[in-house]
Amino acid sequence: MMQFFGMGGYRSRGVIAAALALLAVAGCANQSGPVHDPFGAYNAQGGSRRGGDFSGLEAQAAGYLTPTTYKGLQGGFLTAPLELPGGRLAVVARSDGGTMLGVIYRDTLIWSYHYAADEHPMPGLAADSAGVIYSVSSRGLLRAISPDGRSLWEKAMPGDAGIVVPALPLALANGVIVASSAGVIARYDRSGAVIWSIRRGAAVEGAFAADPVLGVAVALTHNDYDRSDTLLLLDPATGAERWARPVPGMRIVREPAIIGGHIVIGTATRRDDDRREPSVMAFTGDGRAAWRVPLLLMARGFAGDGEGNTYISCAGTGVQAVGGSMISVDSAGKKRWSVSLESGIPAPAAVGASWVYFIARRDGRTGLFTYSHDGVIRNFLPIDVLPDVVSQIMISSFGELTLAAQDEPVLLRAAS
């Protein structure tokens, strides 16, 4: 069901008492519009090529966050906003009896699409260069919704009948690539026509990464430590396999990111005592293993900067560590710096021109950490005014840092 809201359809909370001081991102290399990824597309995982690289945006200190509560949203957000052309944001949020997809502009909810009570959208969106939004749902449905909120088409996710766990969609300039636990990977154009479809003998792990030169990187997993998983590179135009590289004796536990010309994945092996030993691996564009870095905790996300450095978000309970950590390695896999944290970091960092942002806990308080690219802490700013926020951080193409509340329909935007 579609609902539309006029320009007065919101209420502002104003500045929260004892205004929340935070960093904002000021300045942008391209003030004319949103920064496109290499395919002219927008994807919810953040930054160029789903590698968390916002390094073209200059990060500077600012004043406080201005909170906005959106009328028409009854609950919090499930993921960070997705930037669309013209400064609009696509959001996935809780609503009465279910969940909804909506588009907001500044402090106004423009339109919303409400899902059935027995269905909810997966917490990840994509939008192509025309602003068409693509969403996959818990019922295995792929939907395309126009920039003005019209439902264009819906398709059953490719695969066998029954429950199909979808990967997060990846938008290209004129359509979208999707996949599922059934092992089918397919590309649709903007009209919903199938451009190509292939079937592999394993599930797709989490999400894709893409680069116009390298291609589309896909992680295939058997969810079984006794079977080797595979990293696959596809031609985005035809779906043809460029190469496939098994990772012997390992599971791929974190989907790929393309950083500095390398395809980076999170891996793990199982020890004789049944405990896991995590690591991060990088492959070159022609499929050769470039480097492997052992970790104490599982990798939960990757981000990159303009120099080809990788920033690894870690979380969990390991053989020698518990909690979380942020680790940076250079383009050769050499460790640059690391910091241990009391809680895990379940999402990739947001990496600007000068600063690395991530959300974690310190002394029992959730807040925003800001580090330099060289691992020097700028500050930790507690977020005490809300119960919790989404771990993903959005940096808009206009240099605006945005956090999304999990329990309330509130976005926190940086202000100077």
Image: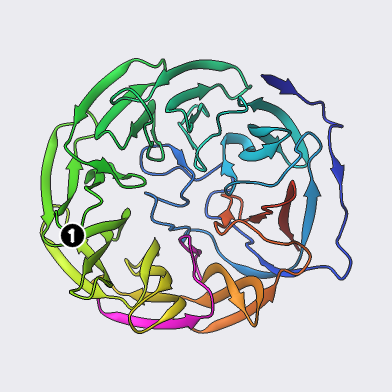
Question: Total of numbered circles in the picture?
Answer: 1
Q: Nearer the viewer, residue 57 or 239?
A: 239
- Hey, which quadrant is residue 2 in on the image? top right
> Image quadrant for the N terminus?
top right
Q: Residue at x 21, y 67 (%)?
A: 269
Q: Residue at x 54, y 43 (%)?
A: 34
Q: Nearer the viewer, residue 38 or 153?
A: 153
Q: Residue at x 24, y 74 (%)?
A: 293
The location of residue 180, given as percent across then percent down, is: 32, 35
> Image quadrant for the C terminus?
bottom right
Q: Which region is colored magenta?
A: 333-354
Q: Is residue 399 above or below residue 11?
A: below
- Hey, which quadrant is residue 287 in on the image? bottom left
Q: Is residue 263 visible?
A: no
Q: Is residue 121 above or below residue 400?
A: above
- Mark 1 highlights which residue? 283
Q: Which element is circle 1 on? A: strand
Q: Is residue 406 above or below residue 129?
A: below
The location of residue 357, given as percent across then percent down, is: 54, 68
Q: Is residue 271 visible?
A: yes
The location of residue 183, given as percent across then percent down, is: 24, 35
